[in-house]
Image (cartoon, grey):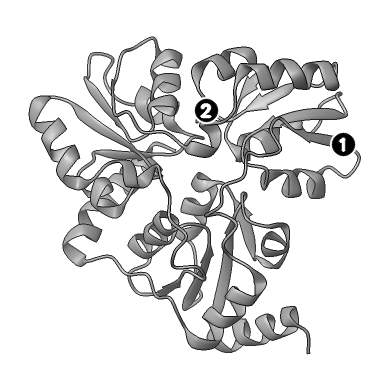
Amino acid sequence: MNIIEEIKKLQKASDAVILAHNYQPGEVQDIADFTGDSLELARKATDIHAAVIVFCGVHFMAETAAILNPDKTVLLPAPDAGCPMADMITGDQLRELKAKHPDAKVLCYVNSTAEVKAESDLCVTSANAVAVARSLPPDQQIIFVPDRHLGSYTAEKLGREFILWPGYCPTHARITENHILAARSAFPGSPVLVHPECPKPVRDAADAVLSTGGMCRYVKGREEKAFIIGTETGILHRLKQENPDTLFHPLLEQAVCPNMKKISLEKILWCLRDMRTVITVPENVSGRARRSIDAMLAVN
């Protein structure tokens, strides 16, 4: 029996569903029951009937699944798969910021800890940040944490000013406008699609700014048969699978999140075999964090 057969056997025996983020290794995406971006995964996590969720992503994603499914067992195959951006702000730091701006509403990017979500009014993803922010009154003061790049992008789209926390994604921050110039020279005529976690000069130089799920929808039905993709390179696997006759070039080959690559087929097998690592969120945090997630999902 090969490793995939073993995983499927254990999955059936434990009544488990496997969810994977678009940045996961290709073989992990292939074995998953559902692959998507943060918004797609959050929506999927509200409609799971299996007893066990194996979350192939990073810690905050598994936390979100646990918050939305308190009656299920949520497993993270690589317990050390963290997120530098999520670690750039703590609950205490957010409480201090809120105290300075008592009339502000807090929008927190889903790339944050449960504790930060619990201190926020609404959660957002890169796919829906503009829509969620637009749902608030135009004169409402907004604190946006932790990603300053997604926050500035959202504020620009609405013609507003936000109070931005200075966090960022190290992987997306590596991408520069010079990389776009080089890619356009190497692949002339290919549209450049970038993620809103990229710095403003990169966003301004691109043809479209989209979440990973948005990129997947954008390329379908387009006349162009080659695209330059400016985000973590794991998305290329899904794009190629869904569009076999289209070429996809990474804007930056080195745009690799080491944490997203910590999960392997072997680790999925071990976590199902041993039922570890179980991700839990304390009740006093989970209930408040869920309110911010539910408020986001209600907008959509």
Tag shown at residue 246: 1
Q: Position of residue 162 (x, y in %)?
A: 29, 19
Q: Which residue occupies the foreground of this view, 45 or 244? A: 244
User: Which residue is located at x 71 percent, y 22 percent?
Assistant: 192
Q: Which residue is mark 2?
A: 196
Q: Position of residue 47 (x, y in %)?
A: 48, 62
Q: Position of residue 133 (x, y in %)?
A: 35, 26
Left or right of 3 on screen, residue 213: left
Do we see residue 86 in this rendering? yes
Quarter placement of the N terminus:
bottom right
On screen, 147 above or below 291?
Answer: above
Left or right of 199 on screen, residue 28: right
Lower position in the chain sequence, tag 2 or tag 1: 2
Do we see residue 102 in this rendering? no
| Alpha-carbon span between mark 2 and mark 1 | 23 Å
On screen, 75 above or below 298?
Answer: below
The single residue placed furthest to the right in the displayed view is 245
Q: Position of residue 183 (x, y in %)?
A: 77, 22
User: Which residue is located at x 85 percent, y 17 percent?
Assistant: 188
Q: Which residue occupies the foreground of this view, 290 or 77? A: 77
User: Which residue is located at x 43 percent, y 13 percent?
Assistant: 156
Q: Which three-letter amino acid code belongs to the residue tagged 1?
A: Thr
Left or right of 272 on screen, residue 31: right
Q: Which three-letter amino acid code belongs to the residue tagged 2?
A: Pro
Mark 1, Cα crowd under 10 Å, few <14 / some 14-19 / many 20+, is some
